Image: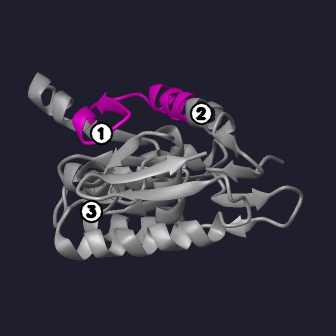
Amino acid sequence: MANKIKLLLAEDEAALGQIVKESLETRDFEVMLCENGEKAFEKYTTEKPEILVLDVMMPKLDGFTLAKNIRAIDDDIPIIFLTAKSQTADVVEGFSIGGNDYLKKPFSMEELIVRVHNLLSRTKTQRKSEIIKIRNYTFNFPKQHLTFKDEDFVQLTHREAHLLFHLIKNKNQVLDRSLILNKLWGTDDFFTARSMDVFISKLRKKLIKDKRIQIINVRGFGYKLTV
């Protein structure tokens, strides 16, 4: 039997949430149901689901704010918003903060399931293309592994992996310090800038086995990965 898909459902309407949960569980989903945004964020951090289905209007933490908090630390997990709202501005906001899809209430379970599978398939395809060769290193971005030649891999942290990914994608060019701080840390203040310096130092040590790879500090601008 195939492994069940871990799905986090945040929905404050108890009856609707239970119906959706039970319907998905008959289709090989493992569903974590939360009745508000705060509990959903806690469950996200501890359970590491594969996809999020978030109601927009929830107590304590609404779906848009919850998605912003998650996107500050996770660029990749697919997010579907559920909402009774249909105004263009709401749809635009949902996509602008990192949502991948938008489903208006009332909806059919078949449509939700199709959208979930489509998003997961798209994400899987993207991740397969994100195994990157950099000189004698192989960087597996989805798994956050860095391997030198045929040696055992080094496990990177979430932020180390995302920082290295952006450095590689912009190799031999200056990676703007403020842009990457805002993307990965959500702010570019002094303390997060110091934190980024620490992560850069850690990456330098993990790339030290190939002397052709350098992370250069371009004072006043950012960092540049040269290969």
Say whether marks 2 and 1 touch (CB < 8 Å). Answer: no
Q: Quadrant of the C terminus?
A: top right
Could you say whether the residue bearing mark 3 is in a helix, strand or loop? Answer: helix
Residue on which the image places disc 2: 126
Q: Is residue 32 left or right of residue 26?
A: left
- Residue lying at 78% horizontally and 51% vertically, measured from the top left: 136
Q: Amino acid at mark 3?
A: Gly
Q: Is residue 33 visible?
A: yes
Provide residue 7's location: percent of width, then percent of height: 52, 52
Could you say whether the residue bearing mark 2 is in a helix, strand or loop? Answer: helix
Task: Magenta stretch: give its range.
Answer: 95-121
Task: Relative to 160, say whether 138 is above or below.
Answer: above
Question: CA gap, disc 2 to disc 3?
Answer: 28 Å
Residue on which the image places disc 3: 37
Question: CA gap, disc 2 to disc 1?
Answer: 24 Å
Q: Amino acid at mark 1?
A: Leu
Residue on which the image places disc 1: 82
